[in-house]
Image (cartoon, helix red, strand yellow):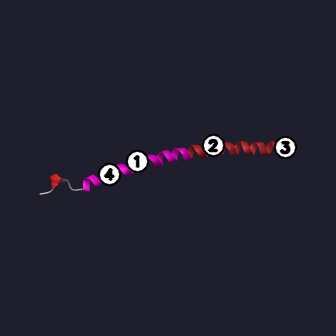
């Protein structure tokens, strides 16, 4: 019985480690996604400014 408890405790410990590693990976990926989203917005604004005719461009 004691062997089974030790085995279960070991499994739980490994699962906690794996969960923490997955959480860290998720946080990192979310930070990357946030950065990419900001860059997409910046590029969309730049494209919009480039394609929008200005008063000085009109004859």
Disc nearer the start of the sequence (3/2): 3
Comparing labels 1 and 2, the label whose residue is closer to the camera: 1
Q: What residue is disc 1 on?
A: 38
Most extreme residue toward the front is 55
Q: What residue is disc 3 on?
A: 3
Tell whether 22 sits left or right of 50.
Answer: right
Disc nearer the start of the sequence (1/3): 3
Q: What stretch of residues is rendered in magenta?
A: 26-51
SS at mark 3 in the image? helix
- Label 4 to label 1: alpha-carbon separation: 11 Å
| Percent position of residue 15, x then y | 69, 46
Comparing labels 3 and 4, the label whose residue is closer to the camera: 4
Residue 9: say if magenta: no
- Label 2 to label 4: alpha-carbon separation: 38 Å
Comparing labels 1 and 3, the label whose residue is closer to the camera: 1
Name the residue rendered at 47%, 46% in the picture: 32
Name the residue rendered at 75%, 42% in the picture: 10
Comparing labels 2 and 4, the label whose residue is closer to the camera: 4
| Percent position of residue 50, x then y | 25, 53
């Amino acid at each position: 019985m004691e062997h089974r408890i030790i085995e279960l405790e070991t499994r739980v410990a490994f699962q906690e480690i794996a969960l923490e590693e997955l959480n860290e990976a998720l946080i990192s990926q979310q930070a990357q996604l946030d950065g990419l989203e900001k860059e997409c917005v910046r590029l969309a604004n730049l494209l919009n400014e480039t394609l929008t005719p200005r008063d000085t461009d009109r004859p």
